[in-house]
Image: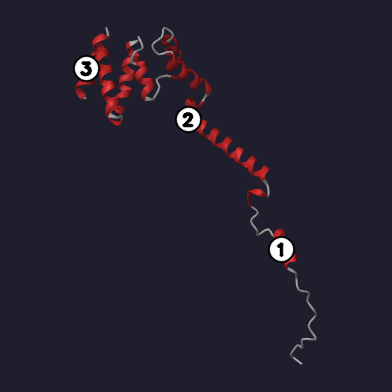
């Protein structure tokens, strides 16, 4: 008797739809989404943002520090005031010559001609990448600097810059 009769098989109870739904809710293969653990999702999003902020600070180096940001802000805020020279002096002592266009332009007005020459040298490769109106403003500032400076080396540097552009 190699065949089974229907009577030989044990009766198996069929599951109701309700039982099937309950089993699927317990399954690890069903995606429960963020609604199942909202506090865990919030914590992981917060942690992710914190890690990204820290990574940005790390790759920015000195520019990512709070002291750099405050010195940079002080430099920009004090431009055109008697406190500008002190703010620029503090910034240069702590961080050296900046590498951004706007701050370098401000430093062209610093009284020390050596800083002006260094700023001009740093600005030179950036000029062609700027918009036309920024280039014209820069060249106007260089013209004024060439006529107003008492330092012959800075005047020569300005004139050379004007001849190139």
Q: Residue at x 62, y 42 (%)?
A: 44
Q: CA distance from mark 1 to mark 2?
A: 53 Å
- Camera sees residue 94: no
Q: What residue is disc 2 on?
A: 60
User: Is residue 45 shown above or below 137?
Assistant: below
Left/right placement of residue 51 relative to residue 32 reads left
Q: Nearer the viewer, residue 128 or 89?
A: 128
Q: Residue at x 24, y 16 (%)?
A: 143
Q: What residue is disc 3 on?
A: 159
Label 2 secondary element: helix
- Percent x, y of residue 42: 64, 41
Considering every residue shown, the one lying at the far bottom of the view is 1
Quarter the N terminus occupies: bottom right
Label 3 secondary element: helix
Q: CA distance from mark 3 to mark 2?
A: 35 Å
- Percent x, y of residue 137: 28, 21
Q: What residue is disc 1 on?
A: 21
Q: CA distance from mark 1 to mark 3?
A: 83 Å
Lower sequence index among marks 3 and 2: 2
């Amino acid at each position: 008797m190699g065949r089974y009769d229907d009577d030989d098989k044990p009766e198996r109870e069929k599951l109701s739809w309700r039982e099937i739904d309950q089993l699927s809710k317990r399954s690890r293969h069903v995606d429960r989404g963020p609604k199942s653990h909202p506090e865990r999702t919030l914590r992981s999003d917060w942690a992710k943002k914190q890690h990204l902020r820290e990574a940005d600070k790390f790759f920015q180096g000195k520019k990512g520090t709070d002291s750099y940001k405050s010195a940079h802000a002080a430099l920009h805020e004090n431009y055109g005031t008697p406190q500008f020279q002190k703010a620029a002096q503090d910034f240069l002592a702590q961080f050296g010559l900046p590498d951004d266009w706007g701050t370098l332009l401000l430093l062209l007005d610093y009284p020390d001609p050596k800083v002006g020459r260094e700023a001009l040298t740093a600005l030179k490769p950036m000029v062609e990448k700027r918009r036309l109106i920024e280039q014209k403003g820069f060249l106007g500032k260089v013209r004024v600097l060439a006529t107003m400076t008492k330092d012959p080396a800075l005047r020569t540097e300005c004139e050379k810059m004007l001849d190139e552009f």
